[in-house]
Image: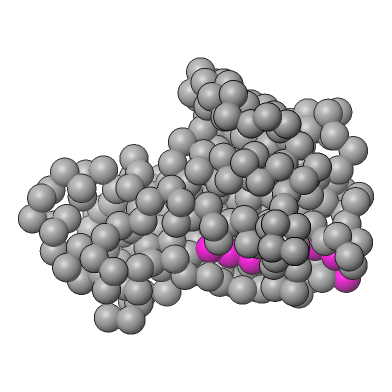
Amino acid sequence: MQNNLFSMHDKVCVITGGSRGLGKAMARAFLEAGAKRVYITARKPEECDATAKELSGLSDSGECVALPGDMSSGEEIAAFAKALAKREDHIDVLVNNAGTGWMASVEEFPEIGWDKVMDLNVKTPFFLTQQLLPLLKANATAQNSASVINIGSIAGILGSAGSGISYGTSKAAIHQLTRNLASLLADDHIRVNAIAPGRFHSKMTSLVEQDKEQYEQEIAMIPLHRWGHDEDIMGPALLLASNAGAFMTGEIITVDGGYLLV
């Protein structure tokens, strides 16, 4: 019973920003749980191909497929959806994980930085979901719903702009987009949820980790006294992608070691 609940057997999945970090960890989780194919996309073809090869080698039955592209471009999103439709007649899971940030003071924040963050963190998840709706709907039923997982952040819940004013704003927007889409797509048997991570070890947080004083201050503030590891995102993603989360939609699940308790 427990194994069946969290099984990804025969599922076809898509993960943006899947070549490293949280995206790579979620791809691994899906493959280890029996996914048939996991498509990953990222801007750098070499990195994307290397990750696909690595993850395919870890699975006995599933395959990780690289479809690199710049998901901040409307033309690239459309091209990606078209390429995917040539390969698959449906998809079961879409993870909108690709994201970026920009650090600057309020007085000096540039329009180009604002637009870059909003485009990739908010516009891309919406328009990619829109483009992939035919594939998401194709195999979805009341008993076997499709799943969209948006990656938000506790920065979209906190009042602090420590991660950058545009970043937190974009993540608050993706949380609300999640609720809106969950309501709009429920009749199509598509569940839409979000995961809002706290601090995880990643390229985006590497500068903080290198600052020993700041890193130790953050660790002291987190009730579980550590940052998140790959396994900490793999579990919630698997819950939302599998039948274990079949009665969940419109939820924003925080995965932050208790940081919001402080």
Instruction: State whether residue 160 appears in this view.
Output: no
Instruction: Return the x and y of residue 6 as percentages of the image width and height.
Output: 68, 58
Q: Is residue 189 magenta?
A: yes
Instruction: State whether residue 241 appears in this view.
Output: yes
**From the viewer's perspective, is residue 180 above or below residue 151?**
below
- Quick one: which residue is furthest to the front in this view? 1
Q: Name the residue rendered at 54%, 57% in the picture.
A: 235
**From the viewer's perspective, is residue 42 above or below residue 148?**
above
Task: Give whichever of 165, 232 is nearer the camera.
Answer: 232
Task: Give whichever of 141, 83 is nearer the camera.
Answer: 141
Instruction: Return the x and y of residue 3 as percentages of the image width and height.
Output: 70, 57
Figure quadrant of the N terminus:
bottom right
**From the viewer's perspective, is residue 148 above or below residue 27?**
below
Q: Name the residue rendered at 91%, 50% in the picture.
A: 138
- Quick one: which residue is furthest to the bottom in this view? 261
Instruction: Return the x and y of residue 43 as percentages of the image width and height.
Output: 53, 29
Is 87 situated left or right of 80 in this image?
right
Is 90 situated left or right of 195 in this image?
right
Task: Give whichever of 118, 96 is nearer the camera.
Answer: 96
Q: Quadrant of residue 240?
A: bottom right
- Quick one: which residue is furthest to the left in this view? 213
Instruction: Return the x and y of residue 25 as percentages of the image width and height.
Output: 50, 43
Q: Name the residue rendered at 55%, 61% in the picture.
A: 236
The magenta segment is 187-195
Is 209 situated left or right of 154 in this image?
left
Q: Quadrant of residue 199?
A: bottom left
Q: Chief secondary structure of the magenta span?
A: strand
Q: Is residue 177 magenta?
A: no
Q: Quadrant of residue 126?
A: bottom right
Figure quadrant of the C terminus:
bottom left
Q: Name the residue rendered at 23%, 58% in the picture.
A: 105
